[in-house]
Image: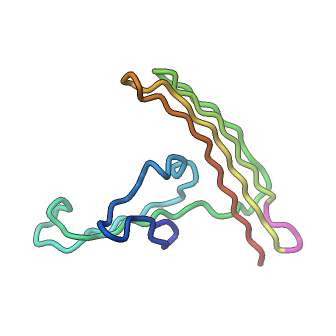
Amino acid sequence: MINGIPVNDMENGAVYWSNWAGLGDVTSAMQVQRGLGASKVAVPSIGGTINVITKSTDAQIGGNVAMSTGNDGYQKYGATLSTGLMDNGFAATVSAAKISGNGYVDGTEFEGINYFIIFQNK
């Protein structure tokens, strides 16, 4: 689930993590609940949930710019900007990033653009 909303396949329960490549950039917390099972370890259990809690609007005005680089042509550029809580009770946070790389194995090149926008009005 993301903010309590299910995002997996309704028929077989598979989660398509490839659709959520930028989710780590905006994750505030992650809740994992183990499913039904007789053992105290999670592997033989049935069911369970993962709930990813995304960032909320920042109370203070500001932002940041980030750049990452790594092996195999990995590059990531991103920026976040927040209006902070304004006098009219409105707040907004916008985050965007571009990621690309050659991949470790031939034919596994990747490129993606991620964005996240959240508004709040009290």
- Tell me: residue 22, above or below residue 67: below
Q: Quadrant of the C terminus?
A: bottom right
Q: Quadrant of the N terminus?
A: bottom left
What stretch of residues is rendered in magenta? 84-88
> Residue 41 placed where, x, y %?
17, 61
Q: Is residue 86 magenta?
A: yes
Q: Is residue 50 magenta?
A: no
Determine which quarter of the picture holds residue 58.
bottom right
Residue lying farthest to the bottom in this orientation: 122
- For image coordinates 45% across by 65% down, the residue present is 7
From the viewer's side, name the closer residue of 84 and 13.
Answer: 13
- For image coordinates 57% across by 39% down, the residue present is 112
> Residue 85 placed where, x, y %?
80, 66
**Mark count:** 0
Q: Main secondary structure of the magenta part?
A: loop
Direction from residue 70 to residue 116 in the image, left or right: right
From the viewer's side, name the closer residue of 86 and 68.
Answer: 68
> Residue 37 placed where, x, y %?
15, 72
> Residue 80 placed where, x, y %?
71, 47
- For image coordinates 32% across by 70% down, the residue present is 11
Determine which quarter of the picture holds residue 48.
bottom left
Direction from residue 120 to residue 30 in the image, left or right: left
